[in-house]
Image: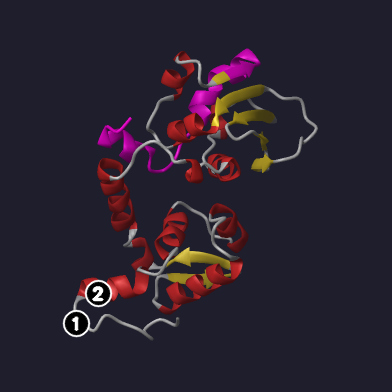
Amino acid sequence: MELGSRGYGQYCPIVRAVEVLGERWSMLIVRDLLVGTSRFNDLARGLPGLSRSLLSRRLRQLELAGIVRRVDGEYHLTEAGRDLEPIVFGLGAWGARWAFGPPRDDELDPELLMWWMHTRIDASALPEGRVVLEFLLTQPTFRAWLVVDEAGVSVCKADPGFEVDATVAAPVATLAEVWLGRRSVEGARRAGEVRISGRREVVAAVPRALLMSPVAEIVRDAGVG
């Protein structure tokens, strides 16, 4: 559907907004743009249930609506797009208070969780030089590595071949709840559900380096943990 080809037959600003943002995936694309994702491939990796063709279509619709602009092959929010921040995170606050419970099985995607987590690493909290964090996840079983070096943070599904500085072991559901602010790292560690082992200084730094989801504070404030 091209923007404006179908409407609700009501003259109302709420209706106009829904016509622009009510298409499936549109709000999640805006969510990811708001937290700093700008490259098409990164948007696709962060929205694995969205086909690349539909992602292209939704981005084009958002461009036509004046919410997104494409610059040098990257996608950035316009002023109108940035004005959506309180709306998007307001929805998150409502969802955290009224519609957010333990994760369902169909919501547990360990690869997506690791992709999200690699975008929220505070490298300054870790010792200088390259730091390799291994994640051993269960239920379902998944193994990944985060490599933090002068180039930034990369996530690897295959062993990068570097010495591991610390290993984080946890069920996927537990790590997802920690990531979203439903549980604290410290509480999950005390319960024996998250285990961090390796070099002492890296083990001590890992909880500080994992900044958690941009909506984790909203979830904590809602008191749903």
Q: Which picture quadrant has residue 180?
A: top left
- The amino acid type, in three-letter code, at marker 2 is Val
Seen in the picture, residue 127 relative to 46 is either above or below; the reply is above
**Residue identifier under label 1:** 11
Q: What is the CA distance from the residue labelled 2 to the residue labelled 1?
A: 7 Å
Magenta segment: 196-225
Of the pair 213 and 201, the residue shown nearer to us: 213
Q: Specify whether residue 72 is in view.
A: no
CB within 8 Å, label 2 to label 1:
yes
SS category of the residue bearing label 1: loop
Was residue 13 drawn as part of the magenta stretch in this picture? no
- Read off the residue under disc 2: 15
The amino acid at mark 1 is: Tyr
Indicate left or right for 178 with 4 as reference: right
* Residue at image point 22% right, 71% down: 14
The x, y position of residue 222, in whole percent, is 26, 37
Q: Residue 131's spot in the image, x, y percent?
A: 67, 29
Residue 86 in the image, given as x and y percentages of width and height:
29, 55
Q: For the C terminus, which image quadrant?
A: top left
